[in-house]
Amino acid sequence: MTSTQDPTPSSDLESRIARLQRLVEISLILNSTLELEPLLRYIMDAASEMVGSESASILLVDRNTRDLVFTASSSNAVADLIGHPVPREGSIAGAILKENRAIALDDVRDDPRHYRGIDRQLQFQTRSLLGVPLSIKHEVIGVLEAVNKKQGRWTQENRNALLVLANQAAVAINNAQLVNALRRAYAELDQLDKLKNDFISIASHELRTPLGVILGYASFLKDEAQGESSAHAQAVFRSALQLRSIIEQMTNLRYLKVGEAELQPERVAVAALMRSAEGDIASLAATKNHTLTVRPAPEDCFVMADPIRIGAALGNILNNAVKFTPAGGQIVMEAVVRRPEVWITIRDSGIGIPADQLEKIFNEFYQVEDHMTRRYGGIGLGLSIARALVVAHHGRIWAESPGADQGSTFYICLPLAVDMSDSSAGQ
Ligand code: ADP
């Protein structure tokens, strides 16, 4: 048999292949579109193109109210209806939803289920309609309708094509809705995070003022008191200092997510940073009779740093050195220039850190000590905050320890200020 004798099967086959290819294209686009509005628009255009209709509409079941809502239409004439519920009883879309099957009507005017309300309100004429359920597994999430066939009547092929499209579309719509819900949840989380940060900064600010008064008088009493009262005043002073360090950590909590853009860097002498940190920790170290030795960097050693933030990082490490070293210990802070960096080390003679914990201690809320047998207190954020701050300065921070009761050393490396980093600059 030659093709001249029977041209129909081959051209029919070709057009079926072309339709399938188009369907594959459509399916690829559906799978890669996660924004709901453009997705719905694309589905409606594809529906009209595949079945030759003037327009198309999508009705979706509201997840909360379970109403069938007129969600989108490719015809501007019905734009006013968007967002309005359509009665489940007494509408064709409602019947499609309920019966979970396609309904094709070549003349809707004769069908009692046609929801005339729509046409009446908008002076829009629905002549014919082909609607299919949008379903995922057994759940029907809405209805896809092709409205007003341009030529002739709906065919079985139209019905099949729209059903295939609806199956793909339902999954894509569901995915886009999930992504939207996730975005909303993230936005709510952001809002909660802001609330938490505001609360922490207000609370820590309000706590700091009375604490300043307590510290001032406790320090005065400690110097004046004699005998037993001297020990009591010492205890009050020590506890007030501990409280101050906890409040500082609370304030620093927002630095956990610090980005480079939030820093206010200036050209600052490393020696000045070290002396300021020494001044902040000296009285706490004295309450435990530690010897605090500071060998600052050379006066002409500069870094580009936000002094408050780097000060907070140094403060957290020094605070730990005091806390995790039994009374009468040694704490040494020193700096060496190793171009193009300066290395600040803080060494203590304290309880040490097991080798397998040296990296974990920089995780948020991680503490070597078991929560049930806590002796040292703290909230497990100091080192993660210090690391976030140092990394934001393009630096590195890590810990080393020979083992239990053999002390620990913390390293903070910061890039030297640009004019310092070549070897001709001052030592
Ligand atoms: P916190 O001190 O509030 O527990 P950090 O994040 O500052 O939280 O420290 C995490 C953990 O790392 C501490 O709980 C402790 O187990 C360990 N650690 C930190 N610094 C030292 C140190 N100098 N000596 C021994 N262990 C330390």
Image (cartoon, rainbow, N blue to C red):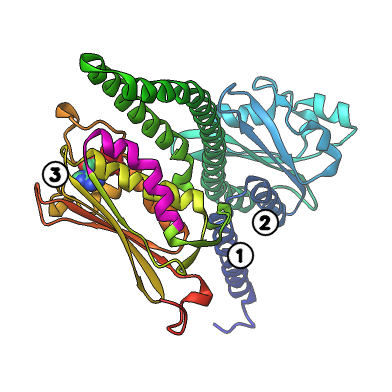
Q: Earlier in the sequence, mark 2 or mark 3?
A: 2
**Magenta-drawn stretch, dominant element (helix, strand or loop):** helix
In this figure, which residue is indicated by the disc labeled 1?
A: 22
The question of residue 30 being in magenta is answered with no
Q: Are marks 1 and 2 in contact (CB under 8 Å)?
A: yes
Instruction: Locate residue 193, reporting x and y percent.
Output: 51, 34
Residue 19 higher or lower than 374, as above or below: below
**Residue drawn at (47%, 57%), measured in percent from left and top?**
392
Numbered disc 2: secondary structure: helix
The residue that mark 2 highlights is: 50
Residue at image position (50%, 48%) is 308
**Cβ of mark 3 under 8 A from ligand 1:** yes
Image location (x, y in percent) of residue 169: 57, 48
The vertical placement of 412 against 204, above or below, is below
Query: What are the residue bounds of the magenta stretch?
Result: 272-290
For the residue marked with disc 2, what is the amino acid?
A: Met
